[in-house]
């Protein structure tokens, strides 16, 4: 619990920003994911994307007439935990040792990505109330560890596979797609001050990045088994994204 209160203190000043052009026009509170967890460092080869990634425009902290914050502490803490979970996932992806083989590197990264969804789901089960989202979270916690294990086994099988892309060249088609995955995950959380909505929004970002990762290996992979698995995951994640979008359309406002 102590760490939660530290996160709350860190996040309180990062909330209450205006929406960017990427999201709908109503002013809402944006959590800056770079300041949400100071120990999160995205890989150096993604740093150049800072200017291209969506950014929030900071404003003064929301306060009532007394000058005190009007934010709900429980919501801020939950948003902080969700944000840190997604940042931790991005960090794990950035720390996967790239071998230069498209299929191996996809399997290794996607295994970490699957576990990242579990971290988000645990926050929803602890703090969220919506039955539909809680069922979704329960399904993630049940299914993703096995998915991660299967991907890890595939990565081990391909550990000695021949390199077929340049891990150091941002213009390499496959490397550029991997950088795009990280860019998606760096989107800011536009907080609704509703725990369930915030979870759905970050799960949407997570799912989008997963689709980008599977599409990358479908386009550039060489291993038939990996491409077949990626196609199945794309289908599943696209269906999940549609479910999230439908829920948000009904509940976001």
Image (cartoon, grey):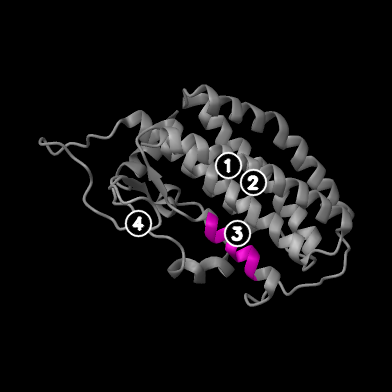
Comparing marks 2 and 3, which lies closer to the viewer?
2
Q: Is residue 197 above or below residue 109?
A: above
In space, the residues marked 1 and 4 are separated at their CA atoms by 23 Å
- Which is nearer the N-term, disc 1 or disc 4? 4
Q: x, y percentage for residue 167?
A: 70, 71
Q: Sort mark 4 into few (<14), some (14-19) or many (20+) by Cα contacts within 10 Å.
A: some
Comparing marks 4 and 2, which lies closer to the viewer?
2
- Which is nearer the N-term, disc 1 or disc 3? 3
Q: Sort mark 1 into few (<14), some (14-19) or many (20+) by Cα contacts within 10 Å.
A: few
Q: x, y percentage for residue 53?
A: 46, 63
Residue picked out by circle 1: 242
Comparing marks 3 and 4, which lies closer to the viewer?
4
- Which is nearer the N-term, disc 2 or disc 3? 3
Q: Looking at the rendered structure, which numbered label has been put on residue 223?
A: none
Q: Looking at the rendered structure, which numbered label has been put on residue 181?
A: 3
Contact? badges 2 and 1 (CB < 8 Å) = yes
Let me know if residue 105 is in the magenta part: no
Residue picked out by circle 2: 238
In space, the residues marked 2 and 1 are separated at their CA atoms by 6 Å
- Which is nearer the N-term, disc 4 or disc 2? 4
Quick one: SS at disc 2?
A: helix
The magenta span reads 176-184
- In the rendered image, the quadrant that contains the N terminus is top left
Looking at the rendering, which quadrant does residue 179 occupy?
Answer: bottom right
Residue picked out by circle 4: 20
- In the rendered image, the quadrant that contains the C terminus is top left
């Amino acid at each position: 619990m102590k760490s939660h209160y530290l996160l709350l203190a860190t996040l309180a000043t990062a909330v209450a920003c205006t929406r960017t052009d990427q999201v709908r026009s109503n002013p809402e509170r944006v959590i800056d994911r770079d300041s949400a967890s100071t120990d999160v460092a995205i890989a150096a080869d993604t740093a150049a994307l800072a200017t291209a990634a969506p950014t929030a425009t900071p404003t003064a902290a929301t306060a009532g007439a007394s000058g005190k914050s009007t934010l709900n502490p429980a919501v801020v803490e939950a948003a902080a935990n969700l944000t840190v979970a997604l940042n931790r996932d991005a960090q794990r992806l950035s720390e996967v040792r790239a071998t230069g083989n498209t299929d191996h590197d996809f399997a290794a990264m996607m295994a970490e990505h699957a576990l990242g969804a579990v971290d988000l789901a645990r926050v929803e089960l602890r703090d969220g109330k919506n039955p539909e989202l809680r069922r979704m979270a329960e399904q993630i916690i049940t299914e993703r560890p096995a998915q991660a294990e299967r991907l890890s086994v595939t990565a081990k099988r391909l550990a000695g596979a021949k390199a077929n892309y340049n891990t150091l060249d941002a213009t390499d088609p496959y490397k550029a797609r991997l950088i795009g995955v990280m860019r998606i995950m760096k989107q800011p959380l536009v907080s609704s001050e509703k725990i369930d909505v915030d979870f759905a929004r970050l799960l949407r970002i997570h799912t989008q990045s997963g689709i980008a990762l599977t599409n990358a290996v479908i386009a550039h992979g060489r291993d038939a088994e990996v491409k077949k698995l990626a196609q199945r995951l794309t289908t599943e994640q696209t269906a999940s994204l549609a479910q999230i979008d439908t829920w948000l359309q009904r509940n976001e406002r």
